[in-house]
Amino acid sequence: PSSLALLGVRAVAGLLVGSLVSGVQLAISQSNTGGAWDNAKKYVEKGCVSILVDGEPVAQRKGSELHKAAVCGDTVGDPLKDTSGPAINIVMKLQAIISLVFADYFMSINGGKGLFNVE
């Protein structure tokens, strides 16, 4: 909050708008990515993916190299889907609450213009 006191209320508003826009995009992206990797593993486990070996299609199921790669992707995807996306939502709310708590402080410095008296 002290660095935003240099620039004033408009800097606080800019920070909130920027973090809200980027936070929403990150949360949606991470949740969707985690879900996609989880679904890819399930898709491989059902035997829906096949590769050509000597001209013949061979279904890739559990234990195949493709399945091992899908499990690695799912291992990365689970934290994205379950924790990272929802955690960004909490960070956005926390920023908004902190800015409300310090609103009087920001307004008390040159009428909200900050120490640099930015118009």
Image (tube, rainbow, N blue to C red):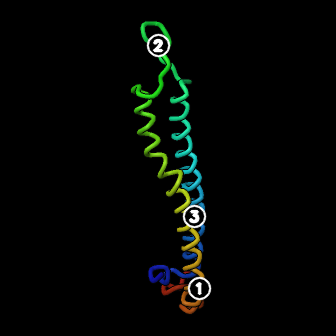
Residue at the image position 44 percent from the left and 46 percent from the top = 76
Amino acid type, callout 3: Asn
Q: Nearer the viewer, mark 2 or mark 1?
A: 2
The kind of secondary structure element at disc 3 is: helix
Sequence-first tag of 2 and 1: 2
Q: Which residue is mark 1?
A: 103
Identify the residue at image location x=53%, y=68%: 91
Q: Quadrant of residue 71?
A: top left
Number of numbered markers? 3
Residue 13, position as x, y percentages in the image: 59, 74
Please tell me which residue lies in front, 105 or 49: 49
From the image, tell me which residue sits under label 2. Answer: 52
Closer to viewer: mark 1 or mark 3: 3
Q: Report helix, strand or loop for mark 1.
A: helix
Q: Dividing the picture into quarters, in which one does residue 73 lie?
A: top left
In the rendered view, would you say 98 is above or below 41? Answer: below
Please rate how many residues cluster around mark 2, counting C-alpha atoms within 10 Å: few if below 14, some from 14 to 19, many from 20: few
Quadrant assignment for the C terminus: bottom right
Disc 1/disc 3 C-alpha distance (Å): 21 Å
Q: Which one is earlier in the sequence, the residue at label 1 or at label 3?
A: 3
For label 3, the crowd category at 10 Å Cα-Cα, with few meaning under 14, some 14 to 19 and many 20 or more, is some
Of the residues shown, which amino acid type is indicated by label 2? Leu
Tell me whether the residue at label 2 lies in contact with that at label 1, contact meaning CB atoms closer than 8 angstroms: no
* Amino acid at circle 1: Ala
Q: Which mark is residue 89?
A: 3
Distance of mark 3 from mark 2, alpha carbons? 44 Å
Asked if the residue at tag 2 contacts the one at tag 3, i.e. Cβ–Cβ closer than 8 Å, the answer is: no
The foreground one among 2 and 45 is 45
Q: Position of residue 4 (x, y in %)?
A: 49, 79
Q: Position of residue 100 (x, y in %)?
A: 60, 82
Q: Residue at x 59, y 64 (%)?
A: 20
